Amino acid sequence: MPETTVHLVLRTFLYQLLRFAFGDSCCVGSGQFVYWRAADPKTCLAPDLFLKLGVPAAHFDFWKTWERGTPELAVEIVSQSDREAWDEKLAKYQDLGVRELLRFDAEAQVGARLRAWDRVDDDLVERALSGDAAESFVVGRFWVVAEVDGVRGLRLAEDAGGRVLVPSPVEAATRETEAANREKEAANHEKKEETRQRQQAEQRVRELEAELKRHNKLG
């Protein structure tokens, strides 16, 4: 099925977020085919997001686990096709061998939009979640549901409540610009205050000189 604009926004945001947050310490993919059976090229997945730790960031057309290793993390942003064939896709992720699998469904009810699976004894076991948040044992942050470009999306945060969100590159650049503007405003304010104090001091000197002249005339 063709990708909706909302799906594109959420997927692109996550890709840029992880690339920015973790830099060259891992390799991130989004939408590329992942193959894990060298003798069976028809068996593959195209995660909305996947991440391999300890591999430098690189450009690639597809991912072969026997060459690059198995991704530790995969994220699926639910589309209509996912709803119709999720059990089949989940079985493939089990076979692929990811350590952590996230499934985000923006149309689900609050508290049910996020599901998570962890690899336990070579099996993907769904985690019991409380609300729309899940700790990531792969990247050491929390997956939370929060606004992304005007819609509800999946984000990373420093806390389960989503109070401190991991910034995207755009957000980080905006914060730097705002901080620079605040510093500039503070410097301008300080300069104006110094000018005001100097002018007051000069005015006081003139007043004292004028008073001294009057006193000398009277004397």
Image (cartoon, helix red, strand yellow):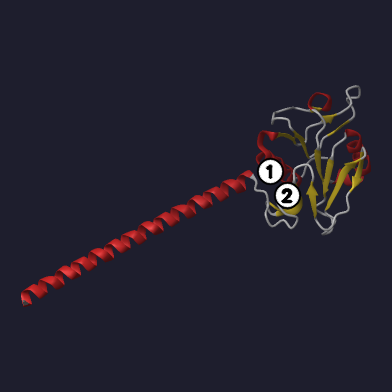
Give how far across and how far down residue 209 sits, in percent.
Answer: 15, 68
Q: Is 199 situated above or below 89?
A: below
- Residue visible at 74% across and 32% down? 54
Q: Is residue 78 visible?
A: no
- Residue visible at 69% across and 34% down? 25
Give how far across and how far down residue 74 sits, in percent.
Answer: 81, 40
- Residue visible at 40% across and 56% down? 188
Query: Are dots 2 and 1 in contact, CB under 8 Å?
Result: yes
Cα distance between the residues tagged 2 and 1 = 8 Å
Residue 17 circle label: 1
Residue farthest top in this picture: 39
Give how far across and how far down residue 159 sits, in percent.
Answer: 72, 54
Name the image quarter holding the C terminus: bottom left
Residue 155 circle label: 2
200 sits to left or right of 88: left
Q: Is residue 83 visible?
A: yes
- Residue visible at 81% across and 28% down? 69
